[in-house]
Image (spheres, rainbow, N blue to C red):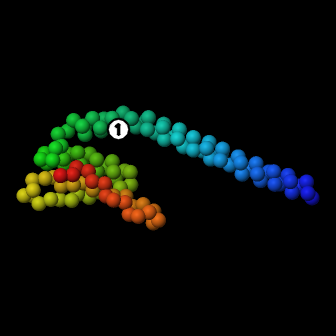
Amino acid sequence: MCLSKKILGSLGLSVFLLAPLAGAQASAAKDQQVSQYLASQKAEQLSLLERLVNTHSGTLNIEGVLKVGKWLEPEFQAAGFTTRWIELPAAMQRAGTLVAERKGPWWHKPPSPVAMCAT
């Protein structure tokens, strides 16, 4: 009986010591999936970045700010964010602000809104 306790104890210790290796392999596989996904999206993301950078969207260019916001809004929504525009009085001559929010798990404090196209 003593021998089987030693064998079971050794087996349990082996499992305990080898478990992190299995986790590392799973993590490496997940990293590979993320890398492949990013590589597959690279051309599309560079195209979006080029459009954003080449669009005159300074604070006083209301049309440009709205255009950039309309391009970014579906990107945020696809990532699980809820979006809304905060309108400003016309007298301010500003486009307003696109706000994107994503609620975290209950044990995290509520996230601060991410403001895009700020005036």
**Amino acid type, callout 1:** Gln
Q: Is residue 39 above or below residue 88?
A: above
The residue singled out by tag 1 in the image is 45
- Total marks placed: 1
Q: Position of residue 69 (x, y in %)?
A: 24, 49
Q: Is residue 103 shown left or right of residue 24?
A: left
Secondary structure state at the residue bearing disc 1: helix
Q: Residue at x 37, y 50 (%)?
A: 78
> In this rendering, does residue 63 appear at all?
no
Quarter location, residue 100? bottom left
Q: Position of residue 11 (x, y in %)?
A: 80, 51
Q: Residue at x 31, y 58 (%)?
A: 113
Q: Is residue 28 shown left or right of residue 41?
A: right
Q: Residue at x 27, y 54 (%)?
A: 115
Q: Position of residue 32 (x, y in %)?
A: 53, 38
Q: Is residue 74 shown left or right of residue 11?
A: left
Task: Work out which residue is located at the far bottom of the displayed protein and give it.
Answer: 106
